[in-house]
């Protein structure tokens, strides 16, 4: 058994444990999952939702902190146990509300109002705690071999008491793959807060723990399905990334590492005394400071897929090895006369001068555009040995203009999931959003995967003739990604709807309204508001339609009249042919 130290350079670095947890939960992925849970408990008042959902998730994250869900199989990275547990809880709740603990499953009004909501909540809660026993398998050791006891104090308190940097984690020797299952009930007893126990009541808790009733067995099956879904999704993602980045081409790591570093503000770009200066063909990286930042980012993102990257030293030796690999892959400028890659630069801007050692990396390997990346000063280069000049015209005499760094999606052999392109509106105030730009962003989100399509609880369902786009969910997702922040997607007369109403391939009612209610099957609990697109126009090429595919259960869609109200009859039938 070997010791290992978790990375401290994560989405939520641990210096103050409570602040780290809240930062992680405020991030895009976790906050979207928590919102998903809250939307599925419409019966909760805001104060009740805070206590029974938000506080529960935050407390659980504080208990397990940055532990992995496994040593090497799935979600083994920092915060893996917390992320995996939340994913399982959300998926289990979706299944519970859509297929199991729904209205028609309760024979009496009392059961429908009291028992079913609590079974759904129990499904969420016990799914969140399903791997809690793993805290007894991953031992956290502090200074003086002080061993964390998860039944006495939260791991966050242990970190704050000792300091995260002074703690290491080791997996219990001889543990079995299923040992944590037997330990989980003991840990749940410690984790279960009074508010949740009070809401569930002793009968529901006893039923779930004993597992003797049909409802309890059903709940356990849901949690197993949700756990397998999360594990398989993580494994598929790891296989794709491993296939993409295990080739040893360090050039492939540059774009994501630089893009994420720029996004986090780790690189000072085009600022005298900063890290990076941009020319027409090359980017100047300060050596070794800026290169070491690239190395650290590459290790964080790709170390688990490439053993060579994982072993890179975070010192000058690691920087030299990284640059040697870039040079071998033609990802680094080399002096044609000496064959050396390190130069001395003199940066001039606004009458000031800065001397430094540097290396040059081609812009295309960083995912940058030559048209938008430019340093408004000038740079002269010389050789380190004799001080003779090296002429690189791409850095000399550049016109002064506002600096705008545009990071493009990296080129890779495997599927790439790019950030959406923010398309600024060029229309007048009366016209709002350009409808074609809006549809392009919709297609990008569908193909890139950040708009859920053709899956349970999706936001887009593609049928043979008609595609159904949920509103305002899709537009809220766009806004989360930085698109059209000036418009409110929940406005009943939103700019999104006004834009789409101008498209010929969006289905319109005689009143020109474009929002329709549909049911995803006869057993649905409530209608879904959608905009109906002509599929061939929305997905404008056979290749695009083949890539996105059809929703496998499109025959379940029941279209409703626009004036349909809850309580009205629902006519059976699939996707309309009109």
Image (tube, rainbow, N blue to C red):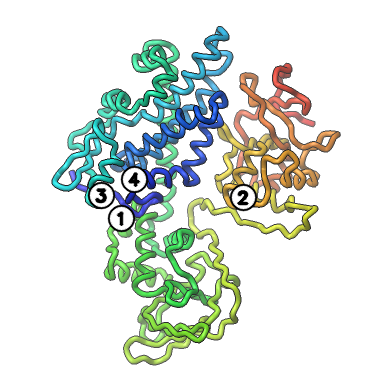
Q: State which tag comes first along the sequence, 4 or 3.
A: 4
Kindly identify the residue that appears in the image at 38 percent across and 46 percent down.
Answer: 19
Task: Estimate the spatial distance between the alpha carbons at disc 3 and disc 1, rounded to whole Å.
Answer: 29 Å
Would residue 514 be seen by someone viewing this image from the given angle? yes
Identity of the residue furthest to the top in this view: 108
Query: Callout 4: 10 Å neighbours few (<14), some, many (20+)?
Result: many
**SS at mark 3?**
loop
Q: Above or below — where is 310 with respect to 323?
A: above
**Mark toward the viewer: 3 or 2:** 3
Q: Measured from the top left, where is residue 61 in percent x and y?
A: 37, 38
Task: Estimate the spatial distance between the alpha carbons at disc 1 and disc 2, rounded to whole Å.
Answer: 33 Å
Mark identifier at residue 17 = 4
Tell me: 535 left or right of 75: right
Q: Above or below — where is 417 with respect to 131?
A: below
Mark identifier at residue 163 = 3
Query: Callout 1: 10 Å neighbours few (<14), some, many (20+)?
Result: few
Q: Which residue is mark 2?
A: 444
Which residue is nearer to you in this view: 384 or 547?
384
**SS at mark 1?**
helix
**Mark toward the viewer: 4 or 1:** 4
Instruction: Tell me the quarter of the image containing the N terminus.
Output: top left
Q: State which tag comes first along the sequence, 1 or 2.
A: 1
Instruction: Tell me the quarter of the image containing the C terminus.
Output: top right
**Circles 4, 2 touching at the beta carbon (< 8 Å):** no
Task: Estimate the spatial distance between the alpha carbons at disc 4 and disc 2, rounded to whole Å.
Answer: 37 Å
Would residue 242 be seen by someone viewing this image from the given angle? no
**SS at mark 2?**
helix
Which residue is nearer to you in this view: 543 or 234?
234
Q: State which tag comes first along the sequence, 3 or 1.
A: 3
Q: Measured from the top left, where is residue 359 in percent x and y?
A: 40, 76
Task: Estimate the spatial distance between the alpha carbons at disc 4 and disc 3, rounded to whole Å.
Answer: 10 Å
């Amino acid at each position: 058994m070997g010791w290992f130290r978790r990375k401290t350079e994560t989405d939520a670095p641990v210096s103050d444990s409570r602040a780290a947890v809240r930062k992680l939960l405020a991030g895009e992925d976790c906050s979207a999952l928590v919102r998903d849970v809250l939307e599925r408990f419409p019966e909760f008042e805001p104060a009740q939702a805070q206590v029974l959902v938000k506080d529960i998730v935050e407390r659980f994250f504080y208990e397990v902190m940055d532990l992995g869900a496994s040593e090497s199989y799935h979600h083994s990275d920092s915060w893996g146990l917390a992320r995996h547990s939340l994913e399982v809880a959300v998926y289990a709740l979706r299944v519970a509300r859509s297929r199991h603990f729904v209205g028609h499953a309760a024979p009496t009004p009392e059961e429908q109002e009291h028992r079913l909501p609590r079974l759904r909540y129990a499904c969420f809660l016990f799914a969140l705690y399903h791997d809690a026993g793993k805290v007894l398998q991953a031992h956290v050791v502090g200074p003086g071999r002080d061993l964390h006891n998860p039944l006495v104090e939260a791991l966050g308190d242990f970190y704050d008491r000792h300091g995260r940097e002074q703690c290491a984690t080791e997996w219990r020797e001889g543990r079995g793959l299923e040992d944590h299952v037997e330990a989980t009930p003991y840990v749940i007893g410690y984790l279960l807060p009074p508010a949740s126990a009070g809401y569930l009541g002793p009968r529901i808790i006893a039923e779930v723990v004993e597992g003797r009733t049909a409802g309890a067995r059903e709940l356990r099956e849901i949690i197993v399905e949700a756990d397998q879904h999360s594990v398989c999704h993580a494994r598929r993602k790891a296989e794709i990334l491993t296939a993409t980045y295990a080739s040893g081409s360090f050039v492939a790591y540059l774009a994501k590492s630089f893009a994420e570093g720029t996004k986090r503000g780790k690189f000072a770009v085009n600022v005298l005394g900063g890290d990076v200066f941009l020319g027409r063909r090359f980017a100047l990286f300060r050596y070794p400071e800026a290169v070491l930042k690239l190395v650290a980012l590459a290790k964080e993102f790709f170390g688990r897929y490439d053993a060579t990257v994982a072993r890179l030293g975070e010192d000058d030796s690691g920087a030299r090895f990284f640059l040697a690999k870039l040079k071998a892959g033609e990802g680094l400028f080399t002096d044609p006369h000496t064959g050396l890659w390190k130069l001395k630069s003199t940066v001039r801007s606004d009458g000031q001068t800065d001397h430094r050692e540097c290396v040059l990396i081609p812009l295309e390997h960083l995912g940058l555009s030559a048209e938008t990346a430019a340093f408004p000063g000038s740079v002269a280069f010389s050789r380190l040995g004799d001080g003779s000049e090296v002429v690189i015209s791409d850095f000399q005499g550049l016109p002064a203009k506002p600096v705008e760094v545009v990071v493009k999606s990296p080129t890779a052999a495997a599927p790439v999931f790019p950030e959406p392109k923010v398309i600024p509106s060029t229309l007048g105030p009366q016209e709002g959003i350009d409808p074609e730009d809006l549809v392009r962003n919709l297609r990008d989100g569908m193909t890139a995967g950040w708009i859920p399509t053709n899956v349970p609880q999706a936001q887009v369902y593609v049928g043979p003739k008609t595609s159904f786009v949920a509103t305002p969910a899709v537009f809220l997702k766009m806004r989360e990604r930085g698109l059209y922040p000036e418009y409110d997607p929940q406005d009943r007369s939103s700019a999104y709807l006004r834009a789409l109403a101008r498209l010929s391939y969006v289905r319109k009612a005689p009143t020109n309204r474009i929002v329709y209610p549909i049911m995803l099957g006869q057993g649905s609990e409530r209608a879904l508001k959608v905009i109906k697109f002509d599929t061939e126009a929305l997905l404008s090429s056979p290749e695009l339609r083949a890539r996105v595919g059809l929703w496998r259960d499109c025959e379940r869609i029941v279209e409703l009249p626009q004036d349909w109200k809850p309580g009205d009859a629902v006519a059976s039938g699939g996707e309309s042919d009109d």
